[in-house]
Amino acid sequence: MAEDQLVGNSYRLIRPIGQGATGTVWRGEHHPTNEPVAVKLLHESLLRQPRLVTRFVQERTILLMLRHPNVVRVRDLFSVGETLALVMDLVDGGNLRDHLHRDGTMSPAEAARLAAQIAAALAEAHELGVIHRDLKPDNVLLDGDGQTRLTDFGIARILTLPSMTTPNAVVGTPHYMAPEAFHGTTPSAATDVYALGVLLYELVCGRPPYRSDSIPELMRLHAEGKPERRDGIPDPLWRIVTTCLSAKPRLRPSAAELVNDLTALAASLRSAPALPRAPSAESEVLAEEAGPRKPPVPGPRRRPHRNDAAGRWSRPGAMAALTVGAMLVSAIATTAWHLGRQDDETPEAAPTVIVAPSVPSLTRAAPRAGASRPPANRSGREHRAAKGVALAAPQPKAAAVRSTRTAPARTTARSPLPEGRARGPWQCAQGLVFDLPSRTAVGPRPCHSTGRDVRFQGSLTAPAGGRARVEVTLRDAATGRTVAGPTTCDLRFTRQSFIRGCGPAAASPRRGRSYTVVMSYRFVRDGRSFSNTARGHTFTW
């Protein structure tokens, strides 16, 4: 889509300003009035997926129902050639995630004030039977007057209509998901209230209450309901946070009740200072030479293993135990819990953190004998069949995991490139996909790193005994067009290697534009298969 192009006879596109799961958001203006607007274009590559198109239209339907000062207003929906466009109010102040990256924390009074506005928007939505289902700082915009505007109802569910989400799918972002949401239960207003409690905690403390890099561990922590209290959190604010984070939905307040409580709290805490920035956590990332790096703050905290991780994805009952919640009981040494932690090396929305008493190294898997050469793509270029990268399972008593390559020593600063030019850390977007009928969970993770060029790769966490065909591409965030790749890998998962990587690959796309890494995969195990696509964070190079 060319910049400054007039679409829909009334709107001029100026430049892309954001990227969502289903579309790219452009800054635009209403041609007759020159009023600024936001125009969300459905990704061209997704137009042949009827469910996603339906979801895009559903977002408009939901937002048209919600006429609230703290919800982004929808103005129009029209077609642009062979794509769809959603026109919304332009909110120029960034989002709460931007604020956290910039300032780390905010004062209790300001956090309560903003949370009260979010609660008011949720209360209006809940009154209409709409559950947001993915409340997090990224989906709360700030206007120039410091008011919040809730957006991205793309995965919301209208309780009175058939769901547009995949049957049995678990939807949400794990750090913000209520305990019941992990098991695919019907969402309720209490699900959003729980996420609001997580968000309030994060605004005050600078990080979510539960910081494990393992999804099963996150499930356990959410179910136990024992968030860490940082020094300096006022008692009244802490009571609201812990009530919202109750493991039992019936014990949480309603969004309408929270509006009054948080408004009063904001007035009473005006003199309370903001907490210092949360300390950074050391992380392991897939680096250019498989060396550890330190990610931007905030990052998830390292948590030690209790047992050897090998084999935790190897038995069919592991995901069943995970699904029904058996691993959440207090007897964490039982076999069900032990098996349920099979993806202890799966990170969530941050560069990879390896949970282990030692630092595991990355090993490159040898090409599979007799592997067929992948077909050429539409442009006539051959797919690049890349070697898979395997993360060895951590060993509990070793100082370091043995591999074909010795892991470099951990450093607190990024290592310079040979040319002396620094490369940024890997930025990764962790996904979580549960396929409940087959009792299988996989964790896709597209990543990028920028320096003298753009490096991109993907990894997949999956049960032992499975195999996957993974394709990783670098795409223009505005148009969805592929600018590099695909890199294609055939991966096999074993007890020792249940996290497998594809790439990295290098590209030098046009500068000054926004890009994203797209990872498509098809996973097969025990005669069952399913396919999906994961998108990385949007970045400008």
Image (cartoon, helix red, strand yellow):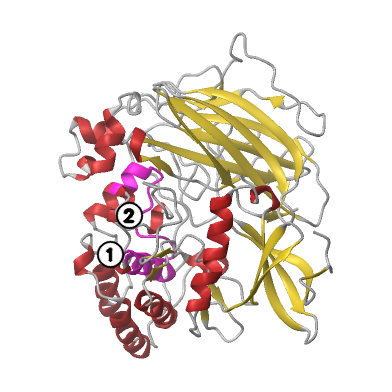
Give residue 34's position: percent from left, percent from top: 78, 84
Please give the residue where the numbered disc 2 appears in the rendered image.
Answer: 181
Residue name at image x 46 percent, y 50 percent = 281
Within-10-Å neighbours for mark 1: few <14, some 14–19, many 20+: many
Q: Position of residue 404 (x, y in %)?
A: 54, 16
Q: Is 62 placed left or right of 247 in the picture? A: right
Residue at image position (34%, 83%) is 259
Residue 214 lies in the magenta-colored region: yes
Magenta range is 191-219
The answer to which quarter of the image holds residue 501 is top right
Q: Secondary structure at mark 2?
A: helix
37 vs 435: above or below: below
Residue at 22 percent across and 45 percent down: it is: 328
In the visual, does 471 lie left or right of 508?
left
Residue 302 among those drawn in magenta: no
Residue at the spot 71% in from the left edge and 34% down from the top edge: 486
Pair 2/1: label in front: 2
**Dominant SS type (magenta):** helix
User: Which one is nearer the viewer's eye here, 146 or 150?
Assistant: 150
Of helix, strand and loop, which one carries label 1?
loop
First of labels 2, 1 by sequence position: 2
The residue beneath circle 1 is 245
Corner quadrant of residue 322? top left
Q: Position of residue 495 (x, y in %)?
A: 39, 21
Which disc number belongs to residue 216? none
Q: Position of residue 397 (x, y in %)?
A: 33, 25
Whether residue 21 appears in this view of the structure is: no
Q: Nearer the viewer, residue 199 or 252?
A: 252
Identified by mark 2, the residue type is: Ala
